[in-house]
Image: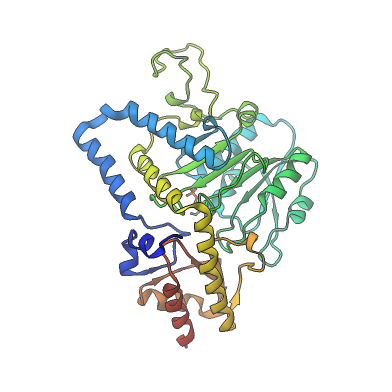
């Protein structure tokens, strides 16, 4: 049994507000905050001397993330954000694909998933939602013989709808269509098996559910994908120095990029907070991912019941647990903005997304937090 009160105590934010905004960014638990301070203290006292060891630790971190999504360590690295990933893919497709092609995505997709492709004038086709859901069949219906890839969020940011990526991935594989998943609103609380789901590329910006701030985006690619669609850009850390000095100093001399996903590191990155993410991952694993999922369902069940008792329109598709996540959206119509403001005055923080009210629950929230929100709803004039 998890002691949820103990977990809550690790999040100082719970002492000064009721925070339902983790889908925008999660607050830090104390052990992660201390780990960040520790990493910067090392930098303060010892400068760069730990760089090699720290890079080895970063490699181990990628290996633990790889394990969570059932792939090999070589297939995982970090880049700055999901927008960068999608832009890299767009450039690569433009460079490599010589015949006409289109990409199918979702109408409600967070723009990080789509702007990079549209900017390269790639033919984007958008599937419309059906009652805030994206049934696999309606995505497949939108594909045709020229569809190169389907790009979808595992969990939609504005409704919390969780896609059945395994079913979709298997269908796409059968049709020879690439499967690109943005797991930002899901990972690491709802990790997917990239092999079983035939995912070619997965990105997860970790400031939502990684509990460590803006540390960047976990970026998974298969070996086959990297071979077929070489990185459109490179930097000194992308180069395979084949056991020589790790710096490729020759000029006008041929070089190859690393075969592994580490080719996408390009150059130095924000290592200190990323290393503190090790602590966040340990914290999450110590609670247990299945326990976390159960807790999120218990809290959101309670919230949904409270909303339904008050006859409030729930926007999120909530009928099937396997389509749910930590996000629940509802609407009071014209009064949404005023309600969010009223809550903020009472230090209850939630957000407007797509015009609706988005509540996202996290492991530090409890039933009393939800009671407070429901009380405001009950008395909101
Ligand atoms: C589904 C989704 N993807 C990506 C992002 C962030 O994109 P980026 O990593 O490019 O800042 C967000 C929210 O900020 C999001 O909700």
| Horizontal side, residue 297 vs residue 48: left or right | right
Q: Quadrant of residue 96?
A: top right
* Residue 271 to residue 134: above or below: above
Note whether 115 is above or below 128 in the view shown.
above
Q: Position of residue 341 (x, y in %)?
A: 41, 75
Q: Residue 3 placed where, x, y %?
A: 40, 62
Q: Residue at x 65, y 57 (%)?
A: 107
Q: Say how many tags the image has.
A: 0
Q: Residue at x 41, y 46 (%)?
A: 282
Horizontally, residue 36 falls left or right of residue 23, namely left
Q: Quadrant of residue 223?
A: top right
Nearest to the observer: residue 23 or residue 65: 65
Residue sitting at x 32%, y 51%? 31
> For this rendering, which residue is in front, 22 or 369?
369
Can the viewer see residue 111?
A: yes
372 or 24, nearer to the observer: 372
Q: Position of residue 142 (x, y in %)?
A: 76, 51
In the rendered structure, the answer to whether residue 307 lies left or right of residue 36 reads: right
Instruction: From this view, report whether residue 151 is shown above or below residue 262.
Output: below
Task: Give the percent coordinates (x, y) of residue 100.
Answer: 74, 37
In the rendered image, the residue lying farthest to the left is 45
């Amino acid at each position: 049994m998890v002691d949820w009160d103990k977990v809550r105590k690790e999040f100082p934010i719970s002492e000064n507000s009721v925070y339902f905004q983790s889908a925008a960014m999660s607050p830090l638990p104390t052990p992660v905050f201390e780990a960040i301070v520790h990493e910067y203290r090392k930098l303060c006292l010892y400068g760069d001397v730990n760089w090699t060891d720290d890079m080895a630790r970063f490699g181990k971190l990628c290996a633990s993330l790889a394990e969570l999504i059932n792939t090999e360590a070589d297939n995982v690295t970090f880049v700055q954000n999901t927008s960068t990933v999608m832009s890299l893919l767009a450039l690569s497709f433009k460079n490599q694909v010589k015949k006409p092609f289109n990409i199918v995505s979702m109408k409600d997709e967070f723009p990080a998933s789509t702007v990079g492709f549209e900017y390269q004038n790639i033919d984007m086709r958008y599937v419309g939602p059906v009652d805030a859901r994206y049934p696999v069949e309606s995505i497949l219906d939108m594909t045709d013989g020229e569809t190169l890839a389907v790009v979808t969020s595992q969990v939609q940011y504005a409704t919390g709808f969780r896609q059945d990526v395994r079913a979709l991935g298997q269908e796409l594989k059968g049709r020879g269509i690439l499967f690109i998943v943005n797991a930002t609103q899901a990972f690491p609380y709802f990790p997917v098996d990239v092999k079983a789901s035939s995912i070619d590329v997965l990105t997860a910006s970790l400031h939502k559910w990684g509990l460590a701030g803006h540390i960047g985006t976990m970026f998974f690619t298969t070996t086959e994908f990297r071979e077929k669609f070489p990185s459109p850009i490179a930097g000194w850390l992308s180069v395979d120095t084949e056991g020589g000095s790790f710096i490729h100093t020759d000029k006008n001399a041929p070089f190859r990029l690393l075969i592994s996903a580490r080719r996408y590191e390009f150059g130095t990155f924000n290592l200190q907070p990323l290393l503190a993410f090790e602590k966040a991952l340990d914290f999450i694993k110590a609670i247990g991912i299945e326990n976390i999922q159960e807790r999120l369902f218990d809290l959101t069940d309670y919230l949904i019941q409270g909303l339904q008792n008050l006859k409030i329109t729930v926007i999120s598709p909530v009928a099937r647990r396997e389509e749910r996540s930590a996000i629940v959206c509802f609407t009071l119509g014209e009064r949404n903005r005023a309600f969010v403001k009223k809550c903020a005055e009472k230090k209850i923080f939630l957000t407007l997304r797509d015009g609706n009210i988005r509540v996202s629950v996290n492991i530090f929230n409890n039933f009393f937090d939800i009671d407070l929100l429901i009380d405001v709803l009950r008395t909101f004039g």
